[in-house]
Image (tube, rainbow, N blue to C red):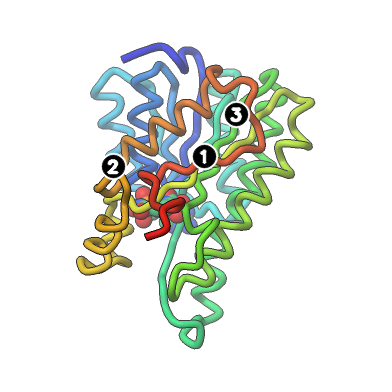
Amino acid sequence: MGNRLKGKVALVTGGAQGIGRAICERFAAEGAAIGVLDIKGDNAERAAQALRDQGAQAHAYAGDVAQRATFEAAVGDLEQRYGRFDVLVNNAIWVRYGPIDAITPEMLARMTGTGFHSVVWGIQVGAAAMARSGGGAIVNIASAASFLGIPSGMVYCGVKAAVLGLTRSASVDLGPQKIRVNAVCPGSVKTEGVAINVNPEMVAKRIARAPLGRLGEVEDIANASLFLASDESSFVTGESLLVDGGTTHALL
Ligand SMILES: NC(=O)c1ccc[n+]([C@@H]2O[C@H](COP(=O)([O-])OP(=O)(O)OC[C@H]3O[C@@H](n4cnc5c(N)ncnc54)[C@H](O)[C@@H]3O)[C@@H](O)[C@H]2O)c1
């Protein structure tokens, strides 16, 4: 427990499970009031209830991050409750890997909707509320895939590379309003989402390639997100932080 986000109000997209849920827990433990936003409303409510059971202030929001109205509703409600809005983590994603000729219009729309459009709408709506609060911090969860060519991952790699472009440009536009925009780039992390897309053989290969000899834990990403959301990074903006155990830089 600490107070690195004491008095702050934060919204985490895809906060019902995996990395998003760990970020909610870490931020709450540091004193933030948390909005847990997820398309799976029941899961979001369960995650928010678990935070409340630990003494945190937490609220669940059900909605699709591809829609601007979802952010307007969640950010609007948090602003109304607390009179301020300070931190947004754009974390939600829907991903499927597959060969280039298997990409369908539906898959493309869903991956760009959750991974790219959502970041645009989150920044637009979140930054306006942060400006009214005197500043804030936006953390976009990108990926090691932002820098790599993952086999059968063309859309995912493209979306995650684009998130870094959004991060850099938004940091320039929003700096004068004291809003910092940064990205965290996780390597392979053990989550429900990864279990769907990555088979055990690929996991073993990834561990074998990792200089630190393990996959990431959700807490590794939550800790990096906390640094970028808190005042400890008050002179850092437009930056991306790889949290991958060294794998991306390793030539094996
Ligand atoms: N897990 C990894 O190895 C890894 C590696 C690199 C980057 N990342 C990134 O970290 C983030 C979280 O990954 P994860 O593995 O925890 O994901 P996950 O699939 O386990 O969880 C994603 C959450 O987002 C929610 N979601 C999906 N579509 C949504 C929508 N349209 N609107 C609102 N919520 C929606 C899901 O319901 C789920 O709760 C993603 O941006 C992912 O790209 C993960």
Q: Percent from the top left, x then y, of residue 15?
A: 39, 42
- For label 2, the SS is loop
Residue at image position (29%, 44%) is 212
Does any atom of ligand 1 lie closer than 8 Å to the CB of label 3?
A: no
Q: Residue at x 40, y 16 (%)?
A: 31
Q: Secondary structure at mark 3?
A: strand
x and y percentages locating residue 101 in the rendered image: 50, 88
Q: Answer few, some or many: residues within 10 Å of disc 3's Cα (few below 14, many 20 plus, some between 14 and 19).
A: many
> Tag 2 or tag 3, which sits nearer the N-term?
3
> Which quadrant would residue 138 be assigned to in this image?
top right
Q: Name above or below for residue 64 compared with residue 6.
A: below
Q: Which residue carries the number 2 mark?
A: 217
The residue where tag 3 is placed is 137
Mark 3 or 1: in front is 1
Would residue 194 appear left or right of 185 to someone viewing this image? Answer: left
Name the residue type under label 2.
Glu
